[in-house]
Amino acid sequence: MRNSIVDSIKTFFAKENLFKNIRNLFLLLAGTFVLSLGSGFLLIPFQIISGGITGITILTSDFIAPDIMSFILSWGLFVIGFIVLGFKFTVSSLISTIFYPVFLSLIMRTGVLEPFLEALIPGDVPIEITNGVITNLDALNIDIGLLLLIGILGGTFTGVGCSLTFHAGGSTGGLDILTFIVSKFTGIKESIPFFCFDGSIVIIGIIVNVVNGDNSHLITGIIGIVAAFITSMLIELIYSGNTSAYMVDIISNKSDEMLDFILHDLDRSATIFEVTGGYTKEKRIMIRVCFSRREYTKIKNGIAKIDKNAFCMFNQTLFVGGEGFDKIKTSEFESFKYIKKINELKK
C-alpha cells in the first residue's frame, strides 16, 4: 500500500505528467466549487432534498450544521472506501472530500449567503437562517415558480460540477463510495444502488415533512426530485453521452505493458486479436477492452502514458453484458416464443 501511494505521488510530479495533472487538479477544484455553489446557495437554504450527502445534511440540519455534517460524512465514507475499495479508487475522490466541506463552510460562515437570499426573495418578512437553512419558509410565501427555478438551478450546478470532476478523472466521493461498495460485493450495476440511495433520501425527506405537517417543505421535496433529474440529465449530456458502457481497441508496440495496465491498474479483462495492417501487411496485436464511463479518463490517460503513439479507437456501446456489467436478459416476449417453439417440437 505504501509503495502504491509513493509511486502515485512520483507519477503525479513527473515532468511529462505535471501539466496534465495540474489541469486535472484545476478541473477537480472547479467542479467541487460549482457543486458547493449549487448546494450552499440553493439546495440547502431552501431545503430542496435531491439526494446525496447534501440531502442528508438538510435532513439533519436541525441538529448539526450542514457543513459540519458534510465534513463528517465525506471523511467517514472516504475512510470506508479506502479500507474496502483501496487507495487507487478513493484517491480520485480526495480533492472533493477535502474541499467540498471547506467551500460549503465559506458560503455559510462568511456572510455572503444572507445578502444573496435577501436579494432573491422579495417581501418585507425578514429571513430567518439557522445553520445555513431558512427556518421560516412558510412565512415567506415564496412563489412555487421561484422555488422550481431554484431547484432547477441547484440541479444544474450539481450536474455541471459532477461532470467537471468526472472529466478530470476524479469523483465527488460521498454516497458514490457506498454505491461502488455495494456493486463490488453484489455484482449489481452501479446505477441501481445509486438510484436507491438517492431515492431513499428524497422519500425520507418527503415523509418527514408530511409527518410534521409542513406543506411548504413537501413542495420542496417534490422539487428535489426535479433537481435530481436535472443533475442526472446534465451528467449524461455533458460527460457520458447516452451510454454508460464504452469499448476501446488498442494497437501498440507496447502491448504487454498495455495489457498489464488493463489487468492490474484498471482491474478489467481484455480480448486479444491478431490483426494485419492493410498497407504494410504487418501482423500486430490488438487489445479490446470494455469499461464503464467512470473509467474513461483513467484508461485514456493510461494509454497515453504507456504509448503516446498507440492507435486506439474509443466507441460508445449500446449494451455490454456479462461479468462486471449488466446481466444478459431475454425479454419475456422472446422467452415465450422460445418456450412455444420447444413445445411444438416436442409434439
Image (cartoon, rainbow, N blue to C red):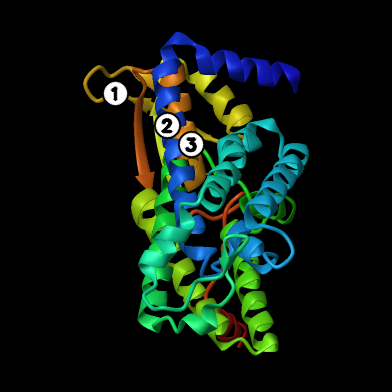
Q: What's the amino acid at mark 1?
A: Gly
Which quarter of the rendering shows the C terminus?
A: bottom right
Q: Earlier in the sequence, mark 1 or mark 2?
A: 2
Q: Position of residue 105 (x, y in %)?
A: 58, 47
In the depicted view, which residue is nearer to us: 298 or 42?
42
Relative horizontal placement of residue 222, taking residue 236 as reference (left or right):
right
In the depicted view, which residue is nearer to us: 121 or 253?
121
Q: Earlier in the sequence, mark 1 or mark 3?
A: 3
Q: Which residue is mark 1?
A: 277
Residue neighbourhood size for the residue with mark 3, other residues' Cα within 10 Å, grouped as few (<14), some (14–19), many (≥20): many
Q: Helix, strand or loop at disc 2?
A: helix
Residue neighbourhood size for the residue with mark 1, other residues' Cα within 10 Å, grouped as few (<14), some (14–19), many (≥20): few
What count of labels does the image hold? 3
Relative horizontal placement of residue 59, taking residue 112 as reference (left or right):
right
Q: Position of residue 31 (x, y in %)?
A: 44, 43
Q: Which residue is mark 3?
A: 169
Q: Which residue is mark 2?
A: 26
Q: What's the amino acid at mark 2?
A: Phe
